[in-house]
Amino acid sequence: MEITLLKCKLHRATVTETHVDYEGSCAIDETLMERAGLREFEQIHLWNVTNGERLTTYAIRAARDSGTISVNGSAAHKASNGDILIIAAFAAMTPEEADEFAPTLVYVDAANRVKQVSRSLPAQA
């Protein structure tokens, strides 16, 4: 049996672009993808903190250190420039693998620059 756990997330990324007339996907600054452990074309979930929209798409690379978070294709109707997103990916693993696993959490500032990277969930207040 396998279970699905959070693999990684980019927390509170700011949408910098939207392009309806693009075939789809979410372009993410290559540095952010590397820090989170996201692969190009990997399935991702976009949770729009600003408007409550939730959708599934895939990641593509944007220019390194550009700060780009571009929501493309039909998903562009669900986000606007300046919206705040949580971008998450999940992985299937055995319970034994899950016992040894911690997700990579990347916290960014308003310009989508890395503020902090964590390999475990933050303590709850």
Image (spheres, rainbow, N blue to C red):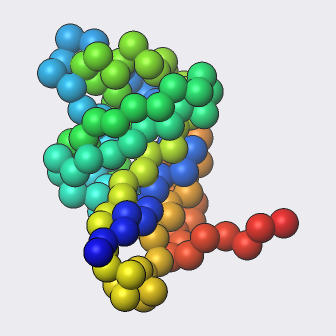
Residue closest to the eye, 24 or 95: 95
Tally of numbered discs: 0
Q: Is residue 111 above or below residue 64?
A: above
Position of residue 96 measured from the top left corner of the image (x, y, whole percent): 37, 88
- Is residue 46 depicted above or below 124 in this figure? above
Can residue 113 be seen by looking at this rendering? no
In the image, residue 31 above or below residue 110: below
| Residue drawn 45% across the image and 70% down it | 103
**Is residue 93 toward the left or the right of residue 78 in the image?**
left
The image position of residue 104, as x and y in percent, is: 45, 69
- Residue positioned 27% across, 52% down in the render: 30
Which quadrant is the C terminus positioned in? bottom right
Whether residue 60 sits left or right of residue 108 in the image: it is: left
Q: Residue at x 56, y 75 (%)?
A: 120
Frontmost residue, 31 versus 41: 41
Counting from the top left corner in percent of width and height, residue 73 is at 25, 19
Residue 18, image x and y in percent? Answer: 36, 20
